[in-house]
């Protein structure tokens, strides 16, 4: 259970100062699971977790896409992936990479949770794509 | 091998100053990526260069000034703020610098292992970016692990350990000079033609 808690001051700040996304209280149980998984995987990155976002994208088909704000997941994260979890690659923010990878794989993304607050531009992207934000949004002032 | 337990045991068998020297040799290979990233983006890398000099000086009983270590902690680049191809390598170099500073202060061997792992991560992410695929795979990981650049870095880290083990326990000025020459004449971790 410890693994889902913030691991550093950076986590504390980004989680503590985030703005709740619309309707977060009404989310299905898997929303919390996706966020827990994102933070659990992020904790395998050591100090770099404070500077890299991991996103967990749920799909209608059941496959989970894990992506990063780097061009690929780090080896320490890759080794933790389970059956049904796919490591997406691509430059840019983790949330966008995850959704785009899901679509390219012919899957239907339904929701995304991130290890750090979802930035305003990613929130706009998710809204436009009809994909739910399963973790809190970050305010535009960060 | 980077992150390999056998190699880590060998590093752990070295004296504290030799462990610091090992981390500095690895960091010096990571530094060109940070410098190139800074030139392209305007990122301020000055505290990391100062930290490097201070860490070298600490091999001769100097210490890293607290203001440098605080500036280095504050200045780490965030991957969401840059789209530059070298952002991960730059991030890893700054984190390695912070681990080296921390090692000069607390002597925990974990910092040395972190520096080695961060170098490996930089190479992994670079080599992964060369593959034109939308998902990572076990096959791709295997190709990366056996890639010339990755194998070369394994060999260089092992060579660094052997070189350090051959030096006298008390690092003389001559020994430190030979380490500086080794650091300055080695090839960078990544080819800088990105």
Image (spheres, coloured by chain):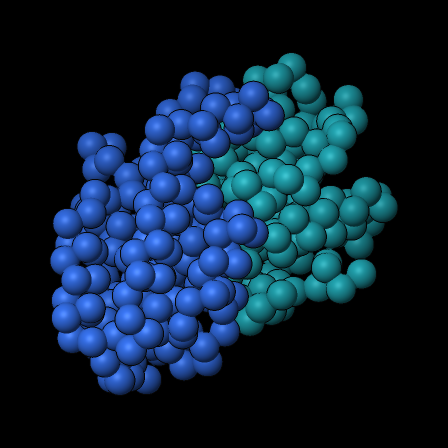
Chain colours: A cyan, B blue
Q: Whole-percent x and y of residue A111? A: 70, 36
Which of the image's four quarters has the C terminus of chain B? top left
Mark count = 0
Q: Residue at x 35, y 68 (%)?
A: B18
Residue B77 shows in the view: no
Q: Residue furthest right?
A: A29
Q: Residue at x 79, y 47 (%)?
A: A33
Q: Whole-percent x and y of residue A119? A: 51, 50
Residue B64 shows in the view: yes
Q: Whole-percent x and y of residue B142? A: 53, 26
Q: Nearer the viewer, residue A6 or B179?
A: B179
Q: Residue at x 41, y 81 (%)?
A: B105
Q: Nearer the viewer, residue A97 or B38?
A: B38
Q: Residue at x 26, y 74 (%)?
A: B171
Tell me if B109 is positioned left or right of B180 in this view: right
Residue A113 vs B180, above or below: the answer is above
Tell me if A27 is positioned left or right of B138 in this view: right
Tell me if B34 is positioned left or right of A75 in this view: left
Residue B153 vs A4, above or below: the answer is above
Q: Whole-percent x and y of residue B180? A: 17, 62
């Amino acid at each position: 259970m410890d693994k889902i808690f913030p691991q550093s001051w950076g986590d504390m700040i980004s989680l503590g100062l985030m703005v709740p996304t619309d309707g977060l209280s009404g989310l299905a149980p898997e929303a919390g699971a996706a966020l827990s998984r994102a933070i659990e995987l992020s904790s395998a990155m050591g100090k770099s977790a404070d500077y890299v976002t991991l996103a967990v994208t749920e799909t209608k088909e059941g496959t989970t896409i894990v992506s990063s704000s780097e061009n690929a997941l780090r080896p320490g994260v890759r080794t933790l992936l389970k059956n049904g979890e796919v490591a997406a690659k691509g430059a840019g923010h983790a949330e966008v990479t995850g959704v785009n990878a899901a679509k390219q794989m012919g899957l239907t993304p339904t929701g995304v949770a991130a290890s750090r607050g979802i930035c305003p531009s990613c929130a706009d992207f998710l809204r436009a794509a009809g994909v739910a934000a399963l973790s809190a949004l970050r305010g535009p002032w960060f | 091998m980077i992150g390999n337990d056998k190699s880590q045991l060998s590093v752990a068998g070295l004296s504290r100053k030799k462990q610091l020297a090992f981390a500095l040799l690895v960091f010096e290979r990571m530094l060109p990526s940070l410098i190139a990233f800074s030139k392209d983006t305007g990122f301020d890398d000055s505290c990391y260069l100062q930290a490097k000099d201070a860490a070298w000086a600490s091999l001769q009983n100097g210490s890293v000034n607290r203001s440098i270590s605080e500036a280095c902690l504050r200045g780490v680049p965030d991957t969401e703020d840059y789209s530059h191809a070298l952002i991960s390598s730059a991030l890893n170099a700054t984190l390695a610098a912070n681990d080296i500073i921390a090692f000069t202060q607390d002597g925990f061997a974990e910092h040395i292992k972190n520096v080695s792992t961060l170098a490996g991560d930089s190479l992994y992410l670079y080599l992964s970016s060369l593959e034109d695929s939308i998902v990572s795979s076990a096959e791709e990981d295997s190709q990366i692990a056996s890639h010339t650049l990755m194998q070369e870095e394994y060999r260089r880290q092992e060579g660094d350990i052997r070189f350090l083990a051959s030096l006298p326990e008390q690092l003389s000025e001559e020994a430190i000079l030979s380490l500086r020459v080794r650091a300055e004449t080695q090839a960078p971790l990544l080819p800088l033609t990105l």
